[in-house]
Image (cartoon, helix red, strand yellow):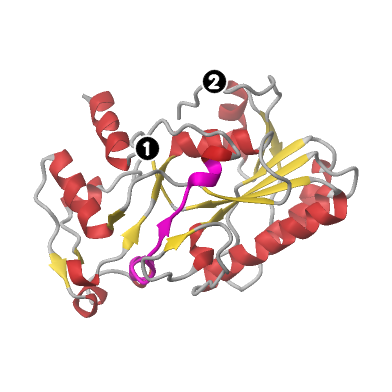
Amino acid sequence: MRVAHLLVPRVRVLALTSQAGRVAPMRAAGITPLLGNLDDARSLRRLAALGQRVLHLAPPAATGSRDLRSAQLLLALRLRPAPLALVYGSTTGVYGDCQGEWVSEVRTLMPQTERAHRRVDAESRVRHFGRATGSQTRVLRIPGIYAPDREGGTPLVRLQKATPVLLAAEDVYTNHIHADDLARACMLALWRGRTQGVYNVNDDVLMKMGDYMDAAAKLYGLPPPPRMSRDALAAVVSPMQMSFLAESRRMDNRRIKRELRLVLRYPSVLDGLAEGLLERA
């Protein structure tokens, strides 16, 4: 991942990991590793007062309607003076199905899946933490992340497998953000933005899923994926994959540009995929 230079102070980076095998690579990258596990509250006590600005990107556990991992992290951070800023990475799934309408950060949340309910719970805990401690909390609502330099970070494998997509009449809008642009948004949010601010973090492209896959197939020199009705598609893909096709949103990203002053390096997902191909050539 490449992160462009930003006008923020030089900082010491500490990162929490539950895997001992990641300690050496972190140190090699100039990061101070902290061994701990968000599922084990006792291992988190040492985190209190270690960082003035905290970026929380860990996903919730796979079951339940509450995010107990966030609850335990926030409790640990309150054992001593709270950090100056706390940024939480949520998802656009908290909005639920918006039937293709434009979605800004003020829209009422209507989570439709259990995993989205866990994210809403985490957002609520983060806001409460900010009000109770005075910490500047910000929530980033993130759509599909892609990264051409990571395994599974592009639609290439799905296209090679000819995984079907929905018929045009039944298709849904999809939203994306390049991993590098997301990293820059995270860094900026640690220093910029309104207190208790919420931000949609997505690029400028408005495309339905099938159109996106067709365009990606052309970019990779592959045939476009077959189209199926929703009922037929449900019989050949996983319930998890179908859940992403049950919601349609067009995300409004103007706030990240206005308040975080983020300039997208990849305003189009197709530009990001194309550059990834050039780098591999």
Residue type at mark 2 is His
Tell which circle, 1 or 2, labels the residue nearer the N-terminal end.
Answer: 2
Which residue: 56% across, 28% down?
25
Query: Where residue 267 is drawn, which disc sits there?
Result: 1
Q: Would residue 39 appear left or right of 61 to someone viewing this image?
A: right
Whether residue 40 can be seen here:
no
Q: Position of residue 243 (x, y in %)?
A: 38, 70
What quarter of the picture does the N terminus occupy? Answer: top left
Residue type at mark 1 is Pro
Q: Would residue 262 appear left or right of 238 to someone viewing this image?
A: right
Say if the magenta span includes residue 155.
Answer: no
The quadrant in which residue 237 appears is: bottom left
Which residue is tagged 2? Answer: 5
Asked if residue 234 is positioned above or below residue 50 in the image, the reply reads below
Whether residue 56 can be seen here:
yes
Q: Nearer the viewer, residue 104 or 19?
A: 104
Q: Secondary structure at mark 1?
A: loop
In magenta, the rendered stretch is: 241-256
Q: Position of residue 99 (x, y in %)?
A: 37, 71
The quadrant in which residue 70 appears is: bottom right
Query: Where residue 199 is drawn, which disc sits there?
Result: none
Tell me the distance, in whole angstroms, between the alpha carbons under discs 1 and 2.
Answer: 18 Å
Which residue: 53% across, 71% down?
111
Which residue: 28% across, 29% down?
275
Depth-wise, is mark 1 or mark 2 nearer the camera? 1
Q: Position of residue 55 (x, y in %)?
A: 66, 42
Q: Secondary structure at mark 2?
A: loop
